[in-house]
Image (cartoon, rainbow, N blue to C red):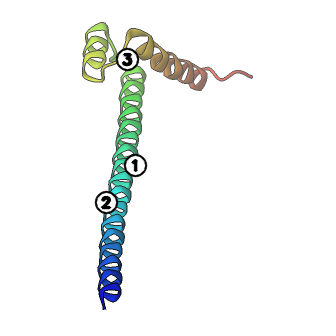
Amino acid sequence: MKIESENEISSTVNEERKQETDYLYRKFVEKHFQDLIHKRAKEIAKERLRHDLCQLIKGLIESNLLNKGLEETIMIVYELSQDELNKIKDHFQNDVIENEYPSE
């Protein structure tokens, strides 16, 4: 009788531990995937922002409206260094020149 009671207690304790372990594992996996989703969402937002910034600079270059004041504002708003802004500008200025005067 006593052995059966101990076995039942042991079985109950093991089942509770298993349930607790399963619960903690599910919480861990859920948190991990939430972190991955959040990280990917930030990457996508950054890519979209970069694309929008490039389109803005391209439009300003094509319409000859890009000046030092706008460049400084863009650098502040988009948290760009002068080098980063220059790389974007160079890319589009070369593209605009190539479109206006295609090489033969």
Q: Badge 3: few (under 14), some or many (20 or more) residues near its Cα, within 10 Å?
A: few
Answer whether labels 1 and 2 touch (C-beta < 8 Å). no
Q: Amino acid at mark 1?
A: Leu
Image height of 66 relative to 59, above or below: above
State the residue position of label 3.
Answer: 64
State the residue position of label 1.
Answer: 36
Q: Amino acid at mark 3?
A: Asn
Which sits earlier in the primary sequence, circle 1 or circle 2?
Answer: 2
For the C terminus, the image quarter is: top right
Front residue of this view, candidates 35 and 1: 1
For the N terminus, the image quarter is: bottom left
User: Marks 2 and 3, Cα distance to the nearest angstrom?
Assistant: 55 Å
Image height of 55 relative to 89, above or below: below
Answer whether labels 3 and 1 touch (C-beta < 8 Å). no
Q: Badge 1: few (under 14), some or many (20 or more) residues near its Cα, within 10 Å?
A: few
Residue at 39% across, 32% down: 50
Image height of 48 relative to 101, above or below: below
Find numbered disc 2 in the image and state the secondary structure of the residue it sits on: helix
- Number of the front mark, 3 or 1: 1
Q: Badge 2: few (under 14), some or many (20 or more) residues near its Cα, within 10 Å?
A: few
Q: Quadrant of residue 53?
A: top left
- Number of the front mark, 1 or 2: 2
Residue 61 drawn at (x, y percent): 41, 20
- Number of the front mark, 2 or 3: 2
Front residue of this view, candidates 18 and 28: 18
Find numbered disc 3 in the image and state the secondary structure of the residue it sits on: loop
Which sits earlier in the primary sequence, circle 2 or circle 3?
Answer: 2
Which sits earlier in the primary sequence, circle 3 or circle 1?
Answer: 1
State the residue position of label 2.
Answer: 27
